[in-house]
Amino acid sequence: MIKLFVFVVLISQFESFSQEKNFHNYYWNNYENTKAIVGATNCYVRANPSIKAVVLDSLQIGDEITVLQSTDVDYAIKGLTVSWVKIEYPNKSGTILKGYLWKGFLALGYTKKKSLTFLTTIDKFEIIKKDSLDVFSISVKILNDKNKVLGQKTFQERLGESSYFQNSTIGGLGLKNITDVYRISFNGEACGIPSLFYYFAWNGTKIIQLPGKICSADGGIYFYNEDFIFPKEKGGKPDTLIKVFKEGEAIDEEVINPIFNVKEWKEIYKWNGEKAILVNKIKSRKYKIRY
């Protein structure tokens, strides 16, 4: 019963997204005097926030800039409708230049570790008419210290009303042949809106997408959580990823800190150094817990 309830909630979020949200500015930060990084190649800097404005310069992937402010002028490229931003950046001689850049050229977020830069971009948005689905093309890219792209992984996903973006590197976590895991998430900012997490393993030559997870909750009514235990974490096992599912429904919604009926089950993935393979599903157990 809880599974069906959670499924219906998630689907309704996706449907309401397509009906209520038309523009995509919310996936990028609300920029004002914020450091950012360019996520595409040959991006024109213009004198004004318009594709008809004079081209002042071009920027390349990995170039770091400062967004001074977002504008109210939106423009659509490849289905993405986002605003122009006013930016400043140093040229090769160190002179600080200013201009306007379409925000879709910027990475949603990035993190640096040693000589590498991990970044995420949204490349395209489309509506698949036969299925009435809103789909984003999202790319994870890894650059070296010369801003050369060492690896890229592009995938298609529905993001529902999950919007606020976060990213981080979390180490190899005991996975054989992996130097780092890059985690990105699109997080819900209200009750009932799911947070979506994606994991990407870097082995020094290519990006390997790992299983993802979804977390959602609605106050004191229900929750649905998926989580991973990696080999180096407490309860972890060598060459194994353990995915733990928990879903709970309050026995009495009117009580402060209610008791929840909880169902928990697991999936076991074997890691062979190149990919995670689902090998076992452990039957659910039921218990009660107070939140």
Image (cartoon, grey):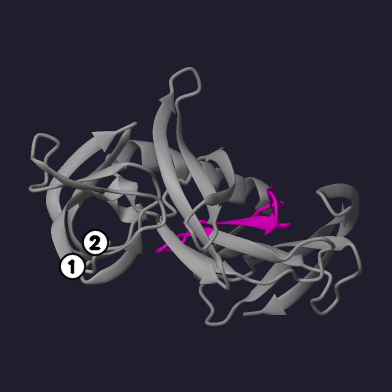
Camera-side residue of 188 and 43: 43
Q: Which mark is residue 95?
A: 1
Q: Which mark is residue 91?
A: 2
Tell which of 272 and 144 is nearer to you.
144
Mark 1 residue element:
loop
As drawn, is 233 to the left or to the right of 91?
right
Q: Where does the C terminus fall, quadrant-wise? A: bottom right
Residue 17: image x %, image y %?
38, 42
Residue at (47, 46) in percent of width and height: 159
Local packing at callout 2 (Cα closer than 10 Å; few below 14, some 14-19, many 20+) is: few
In magenta, the rendered stretch is 185-213
Q: Quadrant of residue 114?
A: bottom right
Callout 1 amino acid: Thr
Q: CA distance from mark 2 to mark 1?
A: 6 Å
Q: Secondary structure at mark 2?
A: loop
**Residue 224 appearing in the image:** no
Relative to 125, 192 lies left or right:
right
